[in-house]
Image (tube, grey):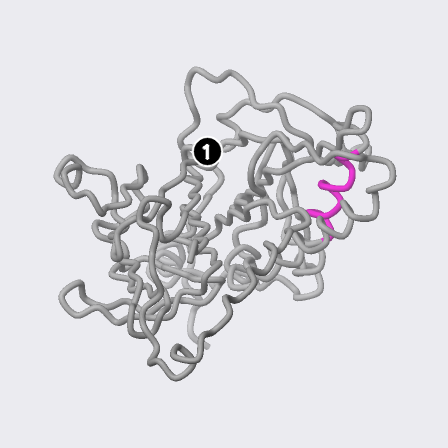
Amino acid sequence: MADQPTGWLSKLSNFLVPASRPQIPVDTKATNTQILNELVASFEESIPRESVGSSMLFNAHFLIILHPDVYEERENAFPVIVNEAVNTFHTIIKSQKEQFKHIAPVASSWYFKFGGGREFGGETVNPEDVKVVGALTGILPGNNPVQSQESVKVTRRVKQTNRYEKMDVDPHTFQHIDFREPGAFVVKFAFEPVAPPAKPAPAASANSRNAPDVPRSINTHAGLAQIDYYIAELNKEAVYQMRDREIVVARKEIDNQHFPNYLLVESAYVSNPHARIRYNDTLQAFQIASFSRNETRVNEQLIPRSEPANPQWHTLPDKAQILLNSMVTLHFQSRL
């Protein structure tokens, strides 16, 4: 029988052909439902702790830390988990209307950031673990903590007591967590949306009943549309009035400053240009074209990339959420 390699020869063999990583049993990994339940628990627990009087306060920013292997396996489900979490948040808020007359969050959007790590806060992150860190607002988004900030006020479930406790966390605690940009989601608050009253249609004259369709008139002073946008990495909001029939969405740079129809976004995650939005008189509808190699989504639907010289136009609903590279959220609202 041939001799088995020993000593340095065995080590060299292991180096050239690494031993396969042991597989983690499926039943010991965190599930999508477990991630959702932990998010909901963090949100629901924060209401009685943070609310005051008749005003409801709650956690709006969440960091979700998973074992790296689980992160890779669950990454495609993150958008669905976030959507389910927000739907549940709304249900919880509605169920407590009698107790709280006012909804008064500190933030302006729900912010979710997923990351993979093997240790957090002195505790090992196992494949079955889901560690949710929640805060009213302002959790650091990733690997570049603000050096002047000594601590971040958060809540998290303490393993020893299995209870959520409020604590200060050193921002450097997050440095070794791999917060990837596709794992970031921002959902604008939408509490009890009120539909605008329907405008009565003008009475048609005998001559106008058979008249051909013409482009609707546009009040360019008021703007064709309003775009409220949120920049996640800066936790910054702004409003843009779309007064031109076609605008370009681009990164804020000196070379773009002199273009009057540019929506300039102060974010490294926005391409230059990223997209164009126009009003099509023939179709009497808004349209969008994406030029970025990074994702552009409209109401969660991916918009295929095209070349700026040959834009491929897609219908843009009169009310839509446009997500740029998972980091900048535009809320588009037609005024027509």
Relative image position of residue 31 (x, y in whole percent): 67, 60
Q: Point out the residue furthest to the right here.
A: 98
Front one among 201 and 255: 201
**Measuring 42% from the left and 74% from the top, which residue is drawn there?**
2
| On screen, residue 5 above or below 242 | below
Magenta-drawn segment: 37-47
Element type where label 1 sits in the image: loop
- Quarter of the image that includes the C terminus: bottom left
Q: Quadrant of residue 143?
A: top left
Say left or right for 89 vs 329.
right
**Measuring 14% from the left and 38% from the top, which residue is drawn there?**
258
Relative image position of residue 179 (x, y in whole percent): 46, 44
- Residue count near mark 1 (Cα–Cα under 10 Å), binned few <14, some 14–19, many ≥20: some
Relative image position of residue 35 (x, y in whole percent): 67, 53
Q: Point out the residue furthest to the front here.
A: 206
Question: Which residue, given by chain and number where applicable, does mark 1 sit on?
Answer: 235
Q: Quadrant of residue 123?
A: top right
Q: Quadrant of residue 233?
A: top left
| Magenta residues, dominant SS class | helix
